[in-house]
Image: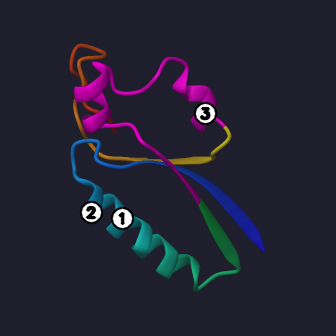
């Protein structure tokens, strides 16, 4: 059975409930195949930004780098001149 490591950042502009719904849909879909999803939730996003003044801690890419897939909302941040995440 193949396992997919997925990094999740809830509440990055779309709301945690939307991210959780996407996770539920992915779990339902993967149930049709011989695969498993392993989710790692990171407490970053809009709430973190308002508390810390940045979207994630420095060098956060090292934390999520092991995951082959990332799930985040479509929020905007001050980083990159307000670029929208994709």
10 Å crowding of disc 1: few (<14), some (14-19), many (20+): some
Residue drawn 30% across and 16% down? 79
How far apart marks 3 and 1 lie (CA) works out to: 20 Å
Q: Residues within 10 Å of mark 3 (few under 14, many from 20)?
A: few
Looking at the picture, tell me which residue is in the foreground, 43 or 30: 43
- Where does residue 28 sit, x and y in percent of width and height? 48, 81
Element at label 1: helix
- Where's residue 86, x and y in %? 34, 39
Tag 2 secondary structure: helix
Image check: 83 left or right of 37?
left
Residue beneath the point at 24% across and 38% down? 75
Q: Which mark is residue 17?
A: 2
Give the Cα distance between marks 3 and 2.
Answer: 23 Å
Q: Position of residue 60 (x, y in %)?
A: 53, 26
Q: Position of residue 54 (x, y in %)?
A: 32, 20
Circle 3 sits in a helix, a strand or a loop, which is it? helix
Label of residue 20 in the image: 1
Q: Which residues are magenta?
A: 39-65
- Please tell me which residue is depicted at 30% across the width and 46% down the height of the picture: 73
Sequence-earlier tag: 3 or 1 = 1
Q: Are marks 2 and 1 in contact (CB under 8 Å)?
A: yes
Instruction: Give residue 63's mark.
Output: 3
- What crowding class fits label 2: few (fewer than 14 Cα within 10 Å), some (14-19), or many (20 or more)? few
């Amino acid at each position: 059975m193949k396992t997919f490591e997925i990094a999740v950042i809830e509440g990055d502009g779309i709301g945690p409930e939307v991210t959780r719904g996407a996770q539920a849909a992915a779990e339902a879909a993967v149930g049709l195949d011989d695969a498993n999803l392993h989710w790692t939730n990171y407490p970053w996003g809009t709430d973190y930004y308002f508390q810390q003044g940045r979207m994630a801690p420095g060098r956060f890419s090292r934390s999520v780098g092991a995951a082959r897939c990332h799930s985040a909302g479509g929020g905007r941040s001050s980083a990159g001149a307000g670029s929208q995440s994709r």
